[in-house]
Amino acid sequence: MQIDLGNRRFWLILFTLGLLSSCSTLKNWITPVATTAMTCKLFADEFVKSPVNPPLYEKRAQACKPVSDPDKLANGVYFLDGNCQKAVPFYGETFQRYCATRMVPGKIQQNTLGNPPGWKYYLPGKQKSTAKKARYETPWTLSHGTQVKAGVIDLTKETRPFVKGVEYRRVGNCSLGMSIYKADPLAKGLKAAMIIHGGAWTYRGTGASIGNEATAPNFTKRGYVVFAPFYRLIGNQSGPEACRGVTGKAQQADLLAALDWVLARGGNYGMKKGTPIDLAGQSSGAQSAAFVALNRPQAVRKVLFLYGPTDFPFFIEESKPGGLWPDAKQFAPSKAALITYSGQTAQTVGQLNPRAPLMQENDFPALVAKNRGKAPRIFMIMGDADQLGPIELPVRLCQAYGGKPLSREKYQPPCNFFQKWINAKACSPKIACDSAGSRLQIVHGAGHALDLKCFHPLVAQIANHVGNAPLAINPFCPSGDKKGEAIVEEALLEAYNEFFTP
């Protein structure tokens, strides 16, 4: 394993975040605003300038002039051409504001991220909402997602996507927002992708939102308009109070409503109508993406599935005494989250009823078998050392796609520790699940969030999750080591360049 000991900022941020998250005295002394400002200051030097294309223009002194720094623009009407003919509503978002909203848990993030009533700017006539009609909508701004080298794919030289927010659903007092990403706000006839954020069905912020920001540019650069819905959350740790405390059933309803919204209104934002949608998700977002795909197979084309659960009934059965994972400490955060997600009363996962309707609806191997030949194709990437979920689950889903018997055995890597250093790829098999292109890339030694770059300060922030319960993510190198990181990067590029290509 190669550790960049020279990256002093990584160690400084790791130490600072650990101190802030573990020391109650400091938490009481330092205000949330100061904590946010301190953390964002540490991250500021990690951001680099990424190109903006098409560039923005404004009218000044009766002339059409290029904008020098779009992130500092006031809310108003600007233009995408040198003749100031292609108008676009736009506002600038500084890095500090972006960081407070997307990267640091706190009141700013809680009140604004995915919460339309808390947004700063709205289009004229789109600043109100009623129980019968969702209306909130923002002007365009520029995403900062390409400006950080936190992912295994370096996006810093890619064009920054434009992004806006819309309200797609209201449930009681809960207003649900959706981010829309495009390379060009005025482009039409685009392919469509829907990204579903992760976060243990519990969180919106930090790792969850950064996952969307890092994934969207990979689609927008390839001719997609990207829709990223926020949904109601289990537990009470994250998001507006009105959008918390639900079960998985409510989340599923939100995500199916989001798909319906995209199918009905996506054409207003450049999507080519009548074409199936591609889905992508990480962690619990991958599970949600697979649920949507397998329950609406006629509306979905392909799925990029990154390190998520696939088979709740099997996971429940094998968490009982005598099963594959009887130890309560093994995958403990996921087991606790699944109990809350299920809505059942249980002390352990093994006490859940695997035959309950919600659990059966998330038995993806059974759904694939039911829709033989009609299930959307899937590209799965997962590590065999994932701290939040067993590799056996995607292996079983891969077998279901191929019509093979489902294994109940523990996965055994095809090589040992020493053989890995001779041929890392031989230890990380890529399995063809079916003849239609579905596949599973197993990354030996990789853990959860394996698409994050080794030894990057933002990984330390996501792993520590300041203000939230810690996630079981390796703060140093989620992909295991630099060889694993290279395998993950190759698999992701294969997904974007080949798998999603018609």
Image (spheres, rainbow, N blue to C red):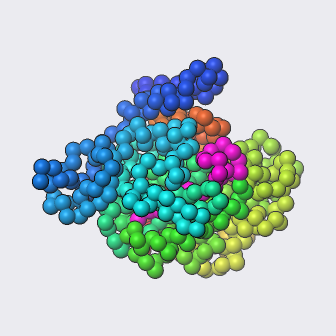
Left or right position of 357 against 384: right
**What residue appears at the point 51 percent right and 30 percent down from the top-left corner?**
33
The answer to whether residue 314 is above or below residue 49 is below
Residue 326 percent across, percent down from the top left: 82, 47
**What residue appears at the point 16 percent right and 58 percent down from the top-left corner?**
82
Nearest the eye: 489 or 110:
110
Q: Residue furthest left?
A: 62
The answer to whether residue 171 is above or below residue 202 is below
Nearest the eye: 397 or 125:
125
Visible residue check, residue 148? yes
Visible residue check, residue 423? no
- Which residues are the magenta region? 225-245
**What residue appears at the point 47 percent right and 38 percent down from the top-left corner?**
100
* Residue 243: in magenta span: yes
Q: Quadrant of the C terminus?
A: bottom left
Determine the main secondary structure of the stretch shown in magenta.
loop
Residue 411 percent across, percent down from the top left: 70, 54
* Residue 134: in magenta span: no
Left or right position of 322 against 375: right
**What residue appears at the point 21 percent right and 44 percent down from the top-left corner?**
68
